[in-house]
Amino acid sequence: MLPSSDDLIRRVEESRGQRTRDLASSLGVTGEEYDDFVALMLRLQSDGSIIRVPEGGWDIPEVARFELIDVTAIEPQSDPGLARVVYTWRWIPTAGGRAFGRTDAPRESRVTFRRNQTGWRMSTVRENRGRIGG
């Protein structure tokens, strides 16, 4: 069960240097609740309620996972040993990622493959920094 904001602030003040995951465990936060716990910690930091980084640093939570949506094109190149693949993908944000403002808007990227003696290997990746349709 997640602690109240006041309980969490008090525990952070009492537990100088304790790592985030250890603090969560000492408060009885379960694995399924950890992302929400990190989001609460981030909210309390951003509003100034918790401003000190623990001595040992923070555990970096996963903020999103990659999801391939579609391969939209395979473009042959003038060099037959090269091919460019265009694909759409998105980040699926965790609760912690949503606290950072991460969205799941689709994006487009390109990757160039080069053929060698053992097969096709990734050569370069270029992400379209803009979101698709925006």
Image (cartoon, rainbow, N blue to C red):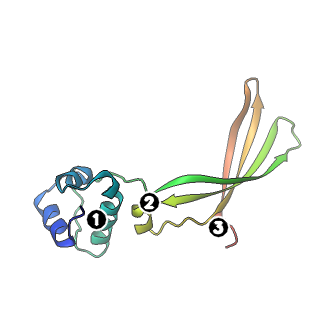
Percent position of residue 90, x then y: 59, 59
Q: CA distance from mark 2 to mark 3?
A: 19 Å
Q: Nearer the viewer, residue 13 or 96?
A: 96
Element on which disc 2 rests: loop
Q: Along the polypeptide, which appears first: circle 2 or circle 3?
A: 2
In which image quadrant can residue 3 be found? Answer: bottom left
Q: Nearer the viewer, residue 59 or 36?
A: 36
Three-letter amino acid code at the position of disc 2 = Thr
Three-letter amino acid code at the position of disc 1 = Met
In which image quadrant can residue 88 be found? Answer: bottom right
Question: Does residue 33 appear to the left or right of 101 in the view shown?
Answer: left
Element on which disc 3 rests: strand
Q: Nearer the viewer, residue 78 or 60?
A: 60
**Residue under the image location 65 percent in, 61 percent down:** 107
Are the residues tagged 2 and 1 within 8 Å (C-beta)?
no
**Residue under the image location 21 percent in, 71 percent down:** 5
Figure check: 133 above or below 93: below
Percent position of residue 14, x then y: 10, 60
- Report the disc number at residue 131: 3
Q: CA distance from mark 2 to mark 1?
A: 14 Å
Q: Give the mark toward the camera: 2 or 3.
A: 2
Query: What residue is disc 2 on?
Result: 94
Are the residues tagged 2 and 3 within 8 Å (C-beta)?
no
Query: What residue is disc 1 on?
Result: 41
Question: Does residue 37 appear to the left or right of 72 in the view shown?
Answer: left
Q: Quadrant of the C terminus?
A: bottom right
Percent position of residue 63, x then y: 44, 57
Three-letter amino acid code at the position of disc 3 = Arg
Q: CA distance from mark 3 to mark 1?
A: 29 Å
